[in-house]
């Protein structure tokens, strides 16, 4: 009689991140009194770096966001200065990874704008952007900076196009036109040579961004993809979405073969969108549900079981969105490996949540802080556009982050106009699809007509003034005397 041995595996692996816990900042280290936008667009409405916290706000007439120094905790004055130059609601904001004072925003007014925030923050409303980028024919819902290149920005619009902007010339240089519906999410691999997108047409795509070529495409019926994130250099993608039974689930994919997911895992039966955040340094994945207060976290490995559940941070306050502090802004002394800035709309509250690895030793923990992407670009815009790929310039967090960034943002001088990319006019007349778009187009045209009428009136006045000046010169007595003298002198010489 043969006895088969049963394989036994513990419920958890030995991991240094098994006991990571979430610590909410004290009330005096939160930001209060911010009128967070009530827009239902599925974005975070929040961007943070080691100097500033930016939040999209509710505002009448046009879109705006506030920029607050990250150390200026407490209640924010209702009349605190705002960045307000857009004519429509602001839908996304992102800080430049290589320049702490530069932030990009996109809006329902079809434009992308680049703003420069003074070192000491805003003293008055900022209405003049350093660059206005017009190329989309509909509202722009997403923007992403290239992870290793200075001056390259990607924008995705409701015209189903992704534009690649070279900010050194202030023009779109490439257009990716392979989507058949609204683009929901964009994510880059570590060196920025590949772009993954999720789309409302239920397809997951891996794209070579410079050529716009689709390298891989998945259309999986059991898993409706909402969000996608590249898992660093693992050659893996992770998507969050909904199963055919309307339960929230995640799926892990091989970036070179999207025919089937490696694994799928159901999370729960809630309806809010799941936002994925990946930390390549610790190989930890955080899943935060929109509209609930939970943040689950996992460790990702290349071997089975691939996805190891660690723990869950729970909070009764629902989150509208989450900003993430870059690595060089974390508190290394407290063994902080990740920090969220949670938007609680009902309270007008921004709540920092630190993810901490419990360690007794107060010395620098080399194993949880490997070399990490720093604040220096690896490539110039021209180098990347010419086809060069290079990984990020790494930095150590051991000495603390105190190196001044020498990069200076210089905006090109350009006129406001649409561009032609790949031989296609980006501002061609696309018919409006909704009543709201029709009204927006109508008001835009009315504004343009009013501006042209004013211009004509001004030019008419100028012409009349010049005609009067010309008549005055002709009728001037000095002119007529000179003419008589000239004629008499000519006669005498004859």
Image: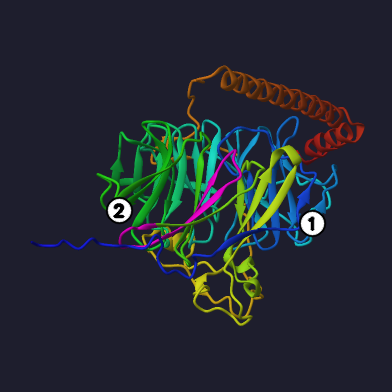
Residue 270 picture location, percent across and down? 51, 35
Q: Name the residue: 49% across, 76% down.
A: 367
Quadrant containing the N terminus is bottom left
Q: Which residues are magenta?
A: 286-307
Which circle's residue, 2 or 1, is located before the other in the chain?
1
Asked if residue 304 lies in the magenta stretch, the reply is yes
Q: CA distance from mark 2 to mark 1?
A: 43 Å
| Residue 414 appearing in the image | no
Q: Is residue 236 toward the left or the right of residue 283 in the image?
A: left
Q: Residues within 10 Å of mark 1 (few under 14, many from 20)?
A: some
Please determine whether, in this image, residue 221 is positioned above or below residue 123: above
Q: Is residue 432 toward the left or the right of residue 118 in the image?
A: left
User: Which is nearer the eye, 19 or 58?
Assistant: 19
Q: Name the residue: 52% across, 66% down.
A: 377
Q: Name the residue: 85% across, 43% down.
A: 79
| Secondary-structure class at tag 1 | loop
Q: Which mark is residue 254?
A: 2
View extreme (top): residue? 435
Residue 191 picture location, percent across and down? 42, 62
Q: Which mark is residue 22?
A: none
Q: Is residue 273 toward the left or the right of residue 316 in the image?
A: left
Q: Which residue is mark 1?
A: 73
Picture quadrant of residue 227: top left
């Amino acid at each position: 009689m043969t006895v088969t041995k049963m394989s036994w595996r513990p419920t958890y692996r030995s991991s240094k991140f098994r006991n990571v816990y979430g610590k909410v900042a004290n009330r005096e280290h939160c930001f209060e009194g911010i009128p967070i936008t009530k827009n239902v667009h599925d974005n975070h409405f929040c961007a943070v770096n080691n100097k500033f916290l930016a939040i999209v706000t509710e505002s009448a007439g046009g879109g705006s966001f506030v920029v607050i120094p990250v150390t200026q905790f407490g209640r924010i004055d209702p009349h605190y200065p705002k960045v307000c130059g857009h004519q429509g609601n602001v839908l996304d904001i992102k800080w430049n990874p290589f320049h702490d004072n530069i932030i990009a925003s996109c809006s329902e007014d079809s434009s992308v704008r680049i703003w420069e925030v003074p070192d000491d923050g805003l003293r008055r409303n900022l209405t003049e952007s350093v660059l206005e980028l017009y190329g989309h024919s509909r509202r722009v819902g997403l923007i992403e900076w290239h992870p290793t290149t200075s001056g390259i920005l990607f924008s995705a619009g409701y015209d189903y196009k992704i534009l690649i902007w070279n900010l050194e010339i202030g023009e779109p240089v490439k257009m990716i036109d392979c989507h058949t519906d609204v683009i929901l999410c964009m994510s880059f691999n570590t060196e920025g040579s590949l772009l993954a997108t999720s789309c409302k047409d239920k397809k997951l795509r891996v794209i070579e961004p410079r050529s716009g070529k689709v390298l891989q495409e998945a259309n999986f019926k059991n898993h409706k993809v909402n969000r996608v994130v590249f898992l660093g250099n693992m050659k893996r993608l992770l998507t969050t979405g909904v199963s055919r039974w309307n339960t929230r689930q995640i799926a892990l994919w091989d970036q070179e073969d999207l025919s089937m997911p490696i694994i799928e895992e159901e999370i729960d039966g809630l309806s809010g969108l799941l936002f994925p955040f990946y930390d390549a340094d610790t190989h930890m994945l955080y899943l935060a549900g929109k509209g609930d207060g939970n943040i689950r976290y996992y460790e990702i490995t290349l071997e089975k079981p691939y996805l190891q559940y660690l723990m869950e941070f729970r909070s009764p306050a629902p989150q509208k969105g989450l900003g993430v502090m870059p690595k060089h802004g974390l508190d290394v002394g407290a063994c902080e490996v990740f920090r969220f800035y949670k938007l609680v709309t009902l309270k007008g509250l921004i709540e920092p949540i630190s993810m901490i690895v419990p360690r007794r030793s107060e010395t620098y923990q080399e194993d949880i802080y490997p070399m990490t992407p720093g604040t220096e670009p690896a490539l110039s815009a021209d180098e990347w556009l010419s086809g060069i790929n290079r990984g990020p310039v790494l930095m150590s967090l051991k000495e603390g982050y105190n190196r001044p960034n020498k990069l200076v943002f210089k905006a090109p001088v350009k006129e406001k106009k649409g561009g032609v990319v790949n031989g296609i006019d980006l501002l061609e007349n696309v018919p409006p699809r909704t009543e709201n778009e029709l009204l927006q187009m109508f008001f835009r045209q009315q504004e343009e007509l009013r501006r042209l009428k004013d211009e004509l009136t001004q030019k008419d006045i100028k012409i009349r003034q010049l005609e009067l000046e010309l008549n005055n010169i002709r009728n001037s007595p000095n002119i007529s005397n000179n003419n008589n003298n000239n004629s008499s002198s000519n006669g005498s010489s004859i």
